Amino acid sequence: MRIRISVLFLSVALSAVSASAQSSQTLTGIVTDAMCGAHHMMQGKTPAQCTRECVKEGSDFALVSGDKVYTLKGDNSQFDKFAGRNVIIKGEVDGKAVTVDSIAASKP
């Protein structure tokens, strides 16, 4: 009986830790790709063009917010519309990834 209660307590505690690891937040930044981050490497291309090319080659869309780079999870067609632009994103942050609930243009 004690073992069952201990196991139950441990599983509830681990669930609480997992739930606190993800938090709904509002982030501002620039939509880019995970490979280039804030420093686009394609010569002669705008940040938006570089982002789209890198995503075509397999990189993920990302958000540069301050000194952090978050991988964006969600609708890539929505992220593509904002490539190279300043945005406001609302979503669940889990480490270095954001599951996006909404994305909208922001002022630079």
Image (spheres, grey):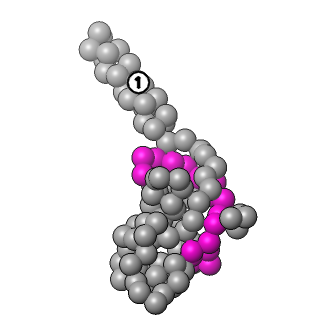
Could you say where residue 13 lies in the image, as x and y percent from the top left?
A: 41, 24
Q: Is residue 72 visible?
A: no
Could you say where residue 94 lies in the image, as x and y percent from the top left?
A: 46, 47
Residue placed most toward the observer, 18 or 5: 18
Label 1 sits on a secondary structure element that is helix
Where, quadrant-wise, is the C terminus in this rendering?
bottom right
Could you say where residue 31 lies in the image, as x and y percent from the top left?
A: 55, 68
Residue drawn 45% across the image and 38% down it = 21
Residue placed most toward the observer, 50 or 104: 50
**Residue assigned mark 1:** 13
Looking at the image, is 88 positioned above or below residue 57?
above
Asked whether, in this view, residue 103 is left or right of residue 42, the answer is right
Q: Is residue 10 visible?
A: yes
Please report the bounds of the magenta region as a residue range.
80-96
Residue drawn 43% across the image and 31% down it = 17
Asked whether 102 falls inside the magenta stretch, the response is no
Looking at the image, is 86 positioned above or below residue 95?
below
| Identity, as a three-letter code, of the amino acid under mark 1 | Ala
Asked whether 86 falls inside the magenta stretch, the response is yes
Could you say where residue 11 lies in the image, as x and y percent from the top left?
A: 37, 27
Residue drawn 31% across the image and 21% down it = 7
Where, quadrant-wise, is the N terminus in this rendering?
top left
